Amino acid sequence: MTSIAANLQAVASRIAAACSAAGRAPAEVSLLAVSKTWPAACVREAAACGQRAFGENYVQEGVAKIAELAELGLEWHFIGPLQSNKTRPVAEHFAWVHSIERLKIAERLSAQRPASLPPLQVCIQVNVSGEESKSGCA
């Protein structure tokens, strides 16, 4: 067994144990494997073990992997801070964005999402503390 397969199996066991302790079914939990800086070959190996969702926080690296691994039908999540000048490739290639912190970014992603794709799934980052040094919508 490869280290990727062993690591995925270990995480699945930990998820199952946590779900059992919480009275939840493991099927209710999704594992997002962060693949940033890992080569596409490692993502392919994880996909062969059943992992379907992958997170990237570098736009160019993520888009390149998405193109290289398109035949696998994986679900891609953008998980890093997103600059407004990089919204188009994110809107065109990713299924999820986990880091919406400004209305401007949300509007650009919405406008740039191709109509042929399902709606983009997003998570809104909220600054609940009100601290200026923190990111997120206030």
Image (cartoon, rainbow, N blue to C red):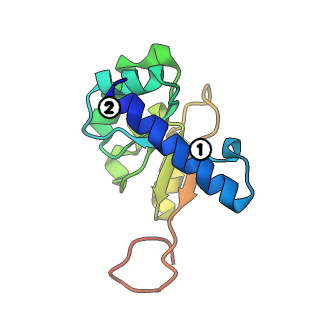
Q: Is residue 130 above or below residue 120?
A: below
Q: Which part of the image, by quadrant, shows the N terminus?
A: top left
Whole-percent x and y of residue 28?
A: 70, 46
Three-letter code for the amino acid on which mark 1 is drawn = Ser
Front position in the image: 68 or 32: 32
SS under mark 1: loop
Foreground of the two, 88 or 74: 74
Residue located 47% across and 32% down the image: 92
Query: Which mark identifies residue 3?
Result: 2
For disc 2, the neighbor class at 10 Å (few under 14, some 14 to 19, many from 20) is: few
Return the x and y of residue 95 as percentages of the image width and height.
Answer: 54, 37
On the question of residue 106 being in view, the answer is yes
Q: In the picture shown, does residue 4 fall above or below 133?
A: above
**Camera-side residue of 18 and 128:** 18
128, above or below 36, in the image:
below
Nearer-N-terminus badge (1/2): 2
Residue bearing the label numbered 1: 30
Residue drawn 46% across the image and 86% down it: 130
- Left-right relation of 77 to 4: right
The amino acid type found where label 2 is placed reads Ser
